[in-house]
């Protein structure tokens, strides 16, 4: 189960890993906390249209990854606040989906600029803590859910990575999944969908990043994480 702030965050952080796990028969569920409604530099794009576009892009990207389910919580992009209600909502989804592994943003990452990334990381971690003990949100248990303790948390874009996943075989799927987010052309993916040259530039940048991440453990292409075992 991924918990990402925006459509495309989980694909950037863990897309190759998720595709490999899906191929191996894992159920991958991608949960996106915000609606992505501020993700454009184009003044002519209407926010309501952008929400629909980004939802559709997320579903297509999830299909490329091989995810079995996508959950959109539709909080307003850019204005996510850490609240007990958000923690409870993430706890609810963890208890519903009962993931073996939760992947999310590393909220300890120094100089992480985007507020939604910081808030999502904190609320996801705290949601995991709440999900595992029955005295947190007993109303959820009264409705038939049980407490749940994932085996591991993996934090992408981690400050101090200590766990690596080989993405050599699924690197291209990661690129393809990211390219589903065409609305992010001018912002995060550098107009990579526009023509083959730009696509190659984008793929080269991601390839270099995957090589940097894999270098400490001798992998050609990897995604690096901080692992926490709750
Ligand atoms: Zn993001």
Image (cartoon, rainbow, N blue to C red):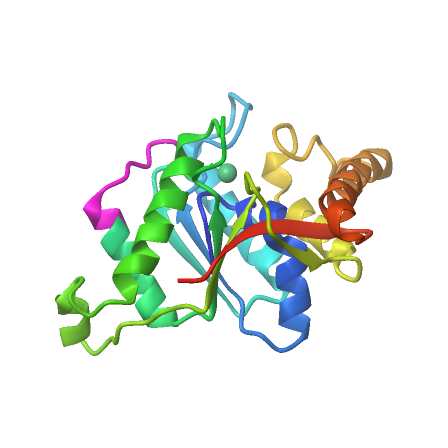
Q: Is residue 124 left or right of residue 229?
A: left
Q: Is residue 6 visible to us here?
A: yes
Q: Is residue 159 left or right of residue 178?
A: left
Q: Is residue 90 visible to us here?
A: no
Q: Nearer the viewer, residue 218 or 19?
A: 218
Q: Is residue 42 left or right of residue 94?
A: right
Name the residue located 52 percent from the left edge and 44 percent from the top edge.
Answer: 53
Label total for image:
0
Magenta extent: 77-86
Q: Nearer the viewer, residue 210 or 92?
A: 210
- Residue, far top: 43
Q: Position of residue 115 (x, y in %)?
A: 40, 31
Q: Nearer the viewer, residue 19 or 218?
A: 218
Q: Quadrant of residue 186?
A: top right
Instruction: Locate the C terminus by quadrant.
Output: bottom left
Q: Position of residue 175 (x, y in %)?
A: 73, 49
Q: Looking at the image, is 3 positioned above or below residue 116? A: below
Name the residue located 48 percent from the left edge and 51 percent from the top edge.
Answer: 104
Q: Position of residue 41 (x, y in %)?
A: 55, 23
Q: Is residue 104 magenta?
A: no
Q: Position of residue 123 (x, y in %)?
A: 33, 47
Name the residue located 44 percent from the left edge and 44 percent from the top edge.
Answer: 5
Main secondary structure along the magenta-highlighted residues: loop
Name the residue located 23 percent from the left edge and 55 percent from the top edge.
Answer: 88
Q: Quadrant of residue 22?
A: bottom right
Q: Looking at the image, is 60 positioned above or below residue 140? A: above
């Amino acid at each position: 189960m991924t918990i990402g702030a925006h459509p495309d965050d989980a694909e950037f952080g863990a897309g190759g890993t998720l595709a490999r796990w899906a191929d191996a028969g894992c159920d991958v569920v991608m949960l996106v906390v915000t609606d992505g409604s501020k993700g454009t530099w184009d003044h002519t794009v209407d926010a309501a249209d952008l929400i629909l576009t980004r939802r559709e892009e997320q579903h297509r990207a999830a299909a490329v990854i091989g995810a079995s389910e996508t959950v959109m919580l539709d909080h307003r992009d850019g204005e996510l606040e850490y609240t007990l209600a958000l923690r409870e909502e993430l706890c609810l989804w963890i208890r519903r989906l009962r993931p073996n592994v939760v992947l999310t943003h590393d909220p300890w990452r120094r100089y992480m600029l985007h507020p939604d990334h910081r808030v999502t990381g904190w609320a996801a971690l705290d949601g995991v803590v709440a999900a595992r003990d029955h005295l947190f949100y007993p109303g959820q248990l009264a409705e038939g859910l049980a407490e749940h303790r994932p085996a591991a948390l993996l934090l992408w874009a981690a400050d101090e990575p200590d766990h690596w996943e080989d993405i050599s075989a699924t690197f291209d799927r990661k690129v393809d999944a990211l390219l589903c987010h065409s609305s992010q052309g001018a912002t995060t993916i550098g107009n990579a969908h526009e023509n083959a040259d730009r696509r190659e530039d984008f793929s080269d940048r991601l390839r270099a990043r995957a090589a940097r991440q894999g270098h400490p453990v001798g992998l050609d292409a990897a995604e690096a994480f901080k692992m926490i075992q709750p």
